[in-house]
Amino acid sequence: MSDDLILAGDIGGTKCNLALFRANARALEAVAEHTYPSRDFSGLETVVKQFNADTGLTTGRACFGVAGAVLGGESHLPNLGWRLSETALASALKLDTVRLINDLEANALGISTLKPEQLFCLNPGQPRADGNRALIAAGTGLGMALLIRAGDGYQVAASEGGHADFAPRNEEEVALWRSLANRFGRVSVERVVSGRGLENIYTHLKQNGMYEPDWLAARLLAADDPAASIAQAGAGGEVLICAEAVELFLSAYGAAAGNLALTGMASGGFYIGGGIAPKLLEKLKTNGFMAAFTDKGRFSEFLSRMPVRVILEPKTALYGAAVAALRLAKCA
């Protein structure tokens, strides 16, 4: 067992990223890192054991950012069905200290480790040094977090705002809401703004008469990640139904982001994480995302002055979990 190492994990519905870090005077140093398909494992314990076997390294301290709410050291990951417990993980993996945090909390903590080139500026804005920040991230699901200004730093508040109600803003979104309500009953924001949400939008458009080429239907049927195929075809304007699905998705994404920015009064900056935004950068720059973000009536001018940046570094949550593990180690 290596006493100078910490184990960090970014545990999502699609994949689990695990890494061992060593903290030096300048930054976190990754010693070993592996990615595993989440659905190939029965739980986090088996993933970590596989990681230990693959690397031949172990440590006594760990923190995992997980795609679910964390209450009292326990979490249920709705997109996987896993139930996690700090106590149970510590016992099963022979760890001295284990901490579970929400994956968006991990993302938020990881922002402090990023360099300018790991961010894309969507709106330069006018940041306030004393202002809060906020983070939204669409991937397999939809996550949100607030970074509340506290002294010289930020206190991160995890959120399950992705499961709040989806609020349609026009007739097109009302029709989408009705379609989803017929399928699912209640319609959350995540039903629209996520990878699965993009699939839901596509299905709605197809059911309402938009043409789906046979080759595309076959591609989506065979795809491990249909949303990625829809996004790729939509971003390039390859197929009309995909282009329309991406436009509707990004407009709804911008509106949800603007709502969070208002909720957190994020005058210090707004961040967009997750795996979808970096793949749609060109569309984000030109489509209705920022228009929907700022379309908030009397607060439109306030939002237009808010800095908005896309996180390009896919390991941000992993770095954030490492930051949390280091803090835990210092308090131990």
Image (spheres, rainbow, N blue to C red):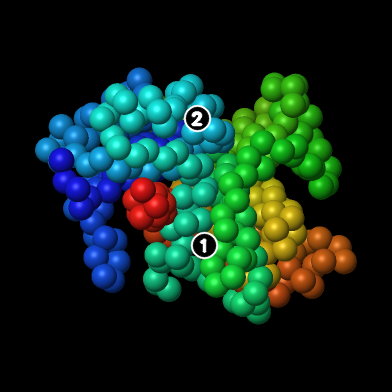
**Marker disc for residue 74:** 2
Residue drawn 15% across and 32% down? 53
Query: Vertical placement of 136 versus 113: above or below?
Result: above
Label 1 and label 2: CA atoms lie apart by 30 Å
Q: Nearer the viewer, residue 300 or 212?
A: 300
Total count of labels? 2
Mark found first going from the N terminus, 1 or 2 = 2
Q: Secondary structure at mark 2?
A: strand
Q: Please provide percent x and percent y for residue 89.
A: 35, 28
* Residue type at tag 2: Glu
Task: Classify 10 Å Cα crowding around label 1: few (below 14), some (14-19), many (20 and above).
Answer: many
Q: Nearer the viewer, residue 113 or 232?
A: 113
Q: Please provide percent x and percent y for residue 164.
A: 72, 38
Left or right relative to 110: residue 181: right
Residue drawn 58% across and 42% down? 142
Q: Secondary structure at mark 1?
A: strand
Residue drawn 49% across and 33% down? 73
Q: Residue furthest left?
A: 56
Residue drawn 52% across and 62% down? 310
Task: Classify 10 Å Cα crowding around label 2: few (below 14), some (14-19), many (20 and above).
Answer: some
Q: Is residue 284 visible?
A: no
Query: Vertical placement of 284 versus 275: above or below?
Result: below
Q: Nearer the viewer, residue 9 or 256?
A: 9
Left or right relative to 62: residue 180: right
* Residue type at tag 1: Val
Query: Vertical placement of 40 versus 172: above or below?
Result: above
Residue identified by numbered label 1? 310
